[in-house]
Image: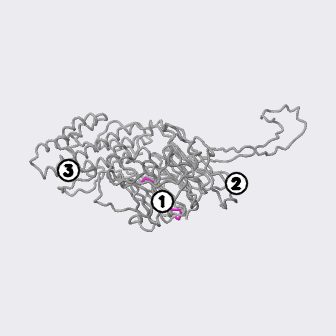
Amino acid sequence: MEVSAEAKRIMVVALGKLYSSRTQRGGLRLHRSLLLTLVMKSARDLYHEAQATAESVAPGYELQQHAAAEVTTEPHVELQGPASPTAGQPRTLPREEVGGPPTELDNKENMCPSGPAQHSRKRRGKAAVEPDFLPCKKAKLEQANCGPQLIVNSVLLDYVNCGSELGAPPPPLPLQRAIAAC
Amino acid sequence: MGEDAESPKINHTFLRDYVTEADVISTVEFNQTGDLLATGDKGGRVVIFQRETESKGELEEVGETGDSGEYNVYSTFQSHEPDFDYLKSLEIEEKINKIRWLPQQNAAHFLLSTNDKTIKLWKVSERDKRPEGYNLKDEEGRFKDVSTITSLQVPVLKPTDLMVEVRPRRVFSNGHTYHVNSISVNSDGETYLSADDLRINMWHLGITDRSFNIVDIKPANMEDLTEVITASEFHPHHCHLFVYSSSKGTLRLCDMRASALCDKHTKLFEEPEDPGSRSFFSEIISSVSDVKFSHSGRYLLTRDYLTAKVWDLNMDKGPVETYQVHDYLRSKLCSLYENDCIFDKFECAWNGSDSVIMTGAYNNFFRMFDRNTKRDVTLEASRESSKPRAVLKPRRVCAAGGKRRKDDISVDSLDFTKKILHTAWHPNENIIAIAATNNLYIFQDRVNPETQ
């Protein structure tokens, strides 16, 4: 469970860094934004894997399942706006406690969950397909339920638009809108 | 590999009780002879140091040949100013990302300096004579009354105090949408490349209003972006070859004879990922922060967060040598991610004979690896350990709670705000320049001055 907590923390930290980099001198750094996005995706994938493992291995732990399901929706709410990661944190803390405090050695924080994945999970590109046990992508998008991915790609779109000769900061756009070419 | 500390005269120039952001050194580069050393800082300034030549008398006494002098400030100038892109509402930092010297062709020296967007060519020239004896002007430069002039004289050149003049000769702007991370002068002496996150341009040194785009990895849909260009360099001898590194840890060797646009690499250097060592931060730590050709042109040296690797151009399956710079950080990656240190970009350097590689680390430590003897050493750039003529003491980092010898430092005691990102090695001799935040350290090996 500490892997889930760790993954969530990493995602939240990544988002905080992404948002704060918008106000940095010199503008958004593409390399840094890309690395943060990749870390977030890694964390999210491993988080979902851990949840899937927990659900399949221990169906009796209803409390944790409840926490997991709620935590899954947590990020979508807390990640919608720049201020919300911090606002969301107090709400997530009780759920982390439910999951159990991390007790492992330092190294564990870096390690992937060792449980067998239900499906073979290849490394995904940026426009990733969600794991099967979650609602299908179309439904998720309509419910604005993509969570980190939606925001992440908006950040990159934002950077691209800032970088293009056409200029002008972008209005909020649904994910599928094409980006003006640089 | 004993080394002597440089005279504190150099260090004192930079000593301050506080560190202003603008004073942080952001690049260090020797010229081709090693007589000049240029540093750039976050405030957009360039400081050039020149090696003093010892007088002939001293040389004869000691029995040494050649220079073994100190480096003193030669010239200082403001290279880049803060700028603003009004169209994109973006501030452009004046920080000097890279400096590269051009090979010297006449009495003047030329260097390229770049910030995030604009590359400039600077001419550094000396003036030690001035004309005297003008007919129409007096000594102060005021025009004489013509009626007082009774004879003609020919102005003569008289020696004066040395003056170093630095003038901008070319400004290469509007070539990059993204942030410039590298510049590299071609061995043809006429062109150079500049690389940003997604594109590499080739410029002619004499033409500022256009450049050739030679690499473009920007995807049609930015959502599909998976890697960026992190560093690029021309081959030291073959003017048609260059290499660029990516955030995925790959190197691409490109041959400009193959096509005008080198998106398709000639060779791809990639080490297969070890699935056992996969973690949340695998992508970040595998990103290559610097790539350097060896002087021979046969090898490539790359630096990623935890290692330095030597690659043979003839073998693309993986590096031929891997050196662990600070593997004790592998279990600390999460903390380093939170305090942003995991994004630090360390540079690396070859010595003149390509037998030793050097790179920086934290706590003002820097590391050297001898490729032949496989010995390595950790040294510290600090005022306490850099008394004049002192021999630098090798340092050791031990695991937290592990057996500690005297003078060892524990991993938990490392100061991550003191990082050595920029280092340079004299092209021929065992002289190294180390940038430690706002301080520049120059160390010379008096025991073995020549690179072997």
Q: Which residues are magenta?
A: B288-296
Q: Three-letter amino acid code at disc 2?
A: Ser
Q: Chain of mark 3?
A: A
Q: Which residue is mark 2?
A: B55
Callout in the foreground (1, 2): 2
As drawn, the residue found furthest toward the right would be: B150
Q: Chain of mark 1?
A: B
Instruction: Provide residue A14's location: percent of width, then percent of height.
Output: 32, 43
Task: For mark 2, give the secondary structure.
Answer: loop
Residue A75 among those drawn in magenta: no
- Is residue A135 something one can see in this rendering? yes
Q: Check the image and report above or below for B450 versus B283.
A: below
Q: Chain of mark 2?
A: B
Residues marked 3 and 2 touching at CB (< 8 Å)? no
Instruction: Provide residue B437's location: percent of width, then percent of height.
Output: 48, 44
Q: Are the residues flagged by discs 1 and 3 from a single subunit?
A: no
Q: Three-letter amino acid code at disc 3?
A: Ala
At 48% across and 58% down in the image, what residue appears?
Answer: B292
Q: Which residue is mark 1?
A: B357
Instruction: Provide residue B393's location: percent of width, then percent of height.
Output: 48, 54
